[in-house]
């Protein structure tokens, strides 16, 4: 009876020892597996974006374990990169872009997101300018800005004038945030030439020009007509 109990006890010790060894070996295998497939992998670190007028330079620090390559997407442009920076060209000025930088491994692709805005550019000339509400002493100058992503915050308006059939002439300069300006105190039958340039944070762009003539003052008044009656 005693011998049987001793044998059972020894068998339990053997089984417990084997189970412990199996558990330790399994744990070791798990640690080695996860060390092989995931330890040190990750998305690019410290992504920085340096803007240009029509480009963005994207750079980053690598994760501990280098990926096969990086995939960088800016707007609709995606590039495969084997280094730690890339220049994305052919972008629009004054535009904010969402940027993704992906570490591409064999079976995973962790990503880091960032954003960048291209620099302001000087604006193109206004599409057109013209005069309306013309009298013999006043006229209103209108203009239409060209489309641009950059904010147009002001306009420089310069004009010169000369009275037809006379030596009288002059000029003026003004600034205006809107789309029109009223020119006053002109003489009858005066030729006016105006130039309009738009302004962004980068400065004034080229101008567009237009011209028109004030009305000729009538030589006849109501009293003149009245004098003609008998």
Image: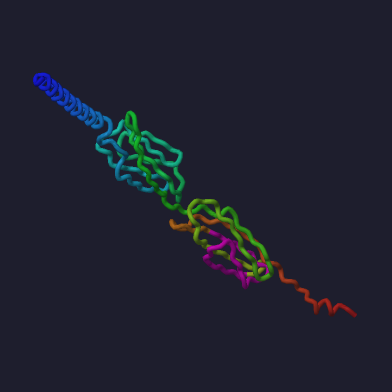
Up-down relation of residue 5 to residue 218 (above or below): above
In the displayed structure, does residue 134 sit left or right of residue 44? right
Name the outermost residue toward the right. 230
Determine the residue positioned at 84% across, 80% down.
Answer: 227
Q: Is residue 215 magenta?
A: no
Determine the residue positioned at 40% across, 43% down.
Answer: 99
How far from the left and from the top, in percent, is residue 73?
A: 40, 39
Up-down relation of residue 70 to residue 50 (above or below): above
Q: Which residues are magenta?
A: 167-196
In the displayed structure, does residue 90 sit left or right of residue 126? left
Q: Quadrant of residue 111?
A: top left
Along the line of sight, which residue is nearer the eye, 1 or 8? Answer: 1
Along the line of sight, which residue is nearer the eye, 23 or 65? Answer: 23
Name the quadrant of the N terminus: top left
How far from the left and from the top, in percent, is residue 47?
A: 32, 44
Along the line of sight, which residue is nearer the eye, 50 or 4? Answer: 4
In the displayed structure, does residue 30 sit left or right of residue 87? left
Name the outermost residue toward the front. 1
Q: How many numbered markers are drawn?
A: 0
Along the line of sight, which residue is nearer the eye, 56 or 78? Answer: 78
Determine the residue positioned at 66% across, 62% down.
Answer: 132
How far from the left and from the top, in percent, is residue 211?
A: 62, 60
Determine the residue positioned at 12% across, 22% down.
Answer: 5
How far from the left and from the top, in percent, is residue 194?
A: 58, 61
Q: Is residue 191 magenta?
A: yes
Name the quadrant of the C terminus: bottom right
Q: Quadrant of residue 129?
A: bottom right
In the displayed structure, does residue 108 sit left or right of residue 227? left
**Helix, strand or loop: magenta stretch:** strand
């Amino acid at each position: 009876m005693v011998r049987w109990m001793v044998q059972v006890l020894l068998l339990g010790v053997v089984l417990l020892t084997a189970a412990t060894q199996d558990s330790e070996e399994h744990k070791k295998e798990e640690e080695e597996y996860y060390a092989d497939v995931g330890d040190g992998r990750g998305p690019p670190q410290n992504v920085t974006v340096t803007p240009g007028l029509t480009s963005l330079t994207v750079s980053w620090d690598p994760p501990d374990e280098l990926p096969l390559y990086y995939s960088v997407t800016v707007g609709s442009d995606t590039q495969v990169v084997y280094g730690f920076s890339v220049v994305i060209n052919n972008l629009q000025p004054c535009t904010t872009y969402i940027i993704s930088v992906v570490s591409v491994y064999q079976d995973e692709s962790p990503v880091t997101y960032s954003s960048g805005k291209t620099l302001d550019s000087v604006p193109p000339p206004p599409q057109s300018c013209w005069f309306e509400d013309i009298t013999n002493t006043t006229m209103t100058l209108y203009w239409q800005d060209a489309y641009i992503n950059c904010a147009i915050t002001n306009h420089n308006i310069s004009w010169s004038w000369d009275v037809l059939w006379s030596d009288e002439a002059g000029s003026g300069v003004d600034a205006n945030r809107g789309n029109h300006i009223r020119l006053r105190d002109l003489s009858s039958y005066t030729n006016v030439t105006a130039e309009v340039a738009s302004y962004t944070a980068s400065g004034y762009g080229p101008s567009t020009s237009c011209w028109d003539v004030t009305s000729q003052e009538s030589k006849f008044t109501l009293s003149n007509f009245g004098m003609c009656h008998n």
